[in-house]
Amino acid sequence: MQKIKLVATGVVTAALLAGTGPAQAMSGPDVTDAVAAKGSSKLKILKEFDYSRSKSRTLPLRQGEYYRNSKGKMVGFGWTKIKKRHNITKYGIIGWLAKSPNVASQGNRRYGLTGFAHHIKCKSGSCKIVDRRKMILVTDETATPVGEGPRFAYFGAVTSFCYDTKKTLKCPTWVNTKFKIPKSASAEVRSMNSGTARDGERYVFTYQPVKTVKGALTLAS
């Protein structure tokens, strides 16, 4: 894992809420504005999670907000947007995604971490995938003031959503109600190929997608 050194930069809250990431905000004189804004409830840290990109820094999840701007576009960030726009309602999902080894740079100190949610049905010893959602957590590593003292943390989780072919970006309810991290994803998938899997539905959350190869379920390498 890459160890990240925080660099104190200004965060222009107005730019963020307009849809621009804090990493694109100006530094220098704007630091004063950022310090003044740090007491805002929108920037309140609700949870902090272990983060796969850093051995020494956690990933904050902020209160955030979600609203319609003057141009009629719904914008926002943080937990409020994640819940209202993308229907993710469990903190544990954000914590799980924050530890994903699958990381893609999006530029401007932003990263996308991915995982996969699977809805699987088994009948007569045979199991098949009926729904799969690629889940993405977008993080921002811009240094942001915290509390009253001279402490800085990552800006943190910007948003999180489920991606599907319809591009609705909204997670189905089962992602929340059935979320559970398996002790061993590979072992759980193998158990569905034994030919003795009991009839019913399964929900599997993995960092690699489950695929069907020659009639058998397997984790992608």
Image (cartoon, rainbow, N blue to C red):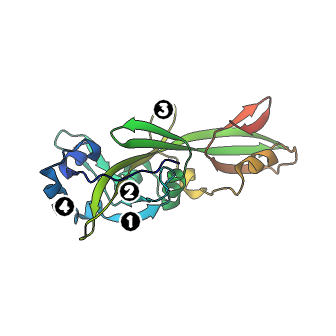
Please state which amino acid type lies under the numbered disc 3.
Answer: Lys
Please state which amino acid type lies under the numbered disc 1.
Answer: Leu
Q: Which residue is mark 3?
A: 166
If you read the primary sequence from the N terminus, does the residue marked by circle 4 or circle 2 appear first? 4
Number of residues whose C-alpha sits closer than 10 Å to that of mark 4, classed few (under 14), some (14–19) or many (20 or more): many
- Mark drawn on residue 35: 4
If you read the primary sequence from the N terminus, does the residue marked by circle 1 or circle 3 appear first? 1
State if disc 2 and disc 1 touch (CB < 8 Å): yes
User: Which residue does the image show at 68% across and 55% down from the upper left?
Assistant: 182
Number of residues whose C-alpha sits closer than 10 Å to that of mark 2, classed few (under 14), some (14–19) or many (20 or more): many
Q: Is residue 20 visible?
A: no
Residue 33 location, quadrant? bottom left
User: Which residue does the image show at 70% across and 50% down from the upper left?
Assistant: 185
For the residues carrying marks 4 and 3, which lies nearer the camera in this image? 4
| Mark 1 to mark 2 CA distance (whole Å) | 8 Å
If you read the primary sequence from the N terminus, does the residue marked by circle 3 or circle 2 appear first? 2
Q: Is residue 109 left or right of residue 103?
A: left
Q: Residue 121: x, y in percent?
A: 72, 44
Give the farthest residue toward the top. Answer: 214
| Mark 4 to mark 2 CA distance (whole Å) | 21 Å
- Mark drawn on residue 79: 2
If you read the primary sequence from the N terminus, does the residue marked by circle 1 or circle 2 appear first? 1
Residues 121 and 36: in front is 36
For the residues carrying marks 1 and 4, which lies nearer the camera in this image? 4
Q: Is residue 45 visible?
A: yes
User: Which residue does the image show at 40% across and 36% down from the upper left?
Assistant: 106
Q: Which residue is mark 1?
A: 46
| Mark 4 to mark 3 CA distance (whole Å) | 41 Å
